[in-house]
Image: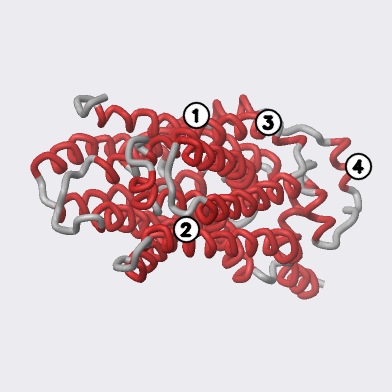
Amino acid sequence: MAGMANSEISTRLEGKSAAIVVCWLLGNGCLFSWNSMLTIEDYYSYLFPKYHSSRVLTLVYQPFAVGTLAILAYNEAKLNTRIRNMFGYILFFISTLLVLIVNSATSGKGGLGIFLAICALSGAFGVADAHVQGGMVGDLSYMQPEFIQSFLAGLAASGVLTSALRLITKAAFDHSSDGLRKGAILFFAISTFFELLCVVLYAFLFPKLPIVKYYRSKAASEGSKTVSADLAAGGIRTLPGTDEENAKDPERKGNKQLLLENIDYAIDMFLIYVLTLSIFPGFLSEDTGSHSLGTWYALVLIAMYNVFDLIGRYIPLMKCLKLESRKLITIATLSRFLLIPAFYFTAKYGDQGWMITLTSFLGLSNGYLTVCVLTSAPKGYKGPEQNALGNILVLFLLGGIFAGVTLDWLWLIGKGW
């Protein structure tokens, strides 16, 4: 009997490797479109030289992301997770396709009208991000920690892939007439295809993996009402006894209590991204002076940030290197603020080697601390509480990004602003 029980559990937990790969791809899709827009910064700087496009596009994106996620996180317990995530990925696909159409139809012409259209699409990316990032982190919080780590690594990998693609397309079209525009169009064509792939993966493959069905069934048995559509997509229509259990034991900690119990983690998430986004990408795109790398310099800095952000997200897989002490995570988060004077003086007096090193460390520490917080915080809670906590922490993450993007404008003081 024991052998049969073990065999049944191992069957339910099949598909772990496939789930990790799919989580990585879905994480990639969550930021691929937005990173594409950031990474063709050289094209938008050429097209809209007066508008500080890297700063403005980010500043437009963030209120939509934070505002939408605040509403979604507040109502998380009542939302259908499947519809939420599908809506997000489909919106990413449509918005990326529209960016491609705008860039193709305008024949490389700038102007305020076109800039406003690009800004509107940036806002759409923000709405899509709020649906997907909060929804997926919440969903994966009650599964295995490797899943959420893989999803977060995918978020960072989107930056690496977009940077690599941009460097390739820039090199391929560098000496042709209208090269910047041709590279940007090819770039967004690839992004559009990738977003469509994510829609297909989430809709048809992910819900049918046995291990995903197992954890969603477990969350439903603990009182989660958000997973029913995902279970139906995986072929599970009803769960014996679930309704009775929910009726008897509907108790779960409220959002306020979860926030109070994890306020240090929430503040850590906020501060990690306040610092990162007050430097990246605006400062790195505009305020690092002129160097021997010329127009390649900002692209190289952004690529180095993205590569080390990705590396940082894999370091916690080694147990001996993972920070789990709440106090040490907070100390590490606060110590990163020493990077602000370091970047200021390096931009003023240092050479490009020092700037590349600092940028790499900014990315490494960002990725590492993000994974440490989001994999440690959900431990010890029931499935519905883990889902809610994941949404709350992502809300603080996006709030930190918004605050950081706003503070990024302070670098412009004394430069005609």
Q: Which residue is mark 4?
A: 244
Dot 3 or dot 4, earlier in sequence? 4
The N terminus - image quarter? bottom right
Q: Amino acid at mark 4?
A: Glu
* Colour pattern of the rendering: secondary structure
Q: Amino acid at mark 2?
A: Ser
Q: Is any part of residue 401 visible from this angle?
A: no
Q: Which residue is mark 3?
A: 253
Residue 248 spot, x, y in % from top left: 87, 36
C-alpha span from label 1 to label 3: 15 Å
How packed mark 2 is, by other alpha carbons closer than 10 Å (few <14, some 14-19, many 20 or more), is many
Q: Amino acid at mark 1?
A: Ile
Q: Which residue is mark 2?
A: 158
Q: Which residue is mark 1?
A: 263
Q: Quadrant of residue 217?
A: bottom right
How packed mark 1 is, by other alpha carbons closer than 10 Å (few <14, some 14-19, many 20 or more), is few
Q: Is residue 4 left or right of residue 291?
A: right
C-alpha span from label 2 to label 1: 29 Å
Q: Secondary structure at mark 2?
A: helix
Dot 1 or dot 4, earlier in sequence? 4
Nearest-to-viewer mark from 3 and 2: 2
Dot 1 or dot 3, earlier in sequence? 3
Judge whether 67 appears above or below 143 on screen.
above
For residue 291, the mark is: none
Q: Quadrant of residue 160?
A: bottom left
Q: Secondary structure at mark 3?
A: loop
Residue 54 spot, x, y in % from top left: 38, 41
Nearest-to-viewer mark from 2 and 1: 2
At 62% from the left edge and 52% from the top edge, which residue is drawn? Answer: 140
Query: Is the Cβ of the residue at disc 1 closer than 8 Å to that at disc 4?
Result: no
Q: Amino acid at mark 3?
A: Lys
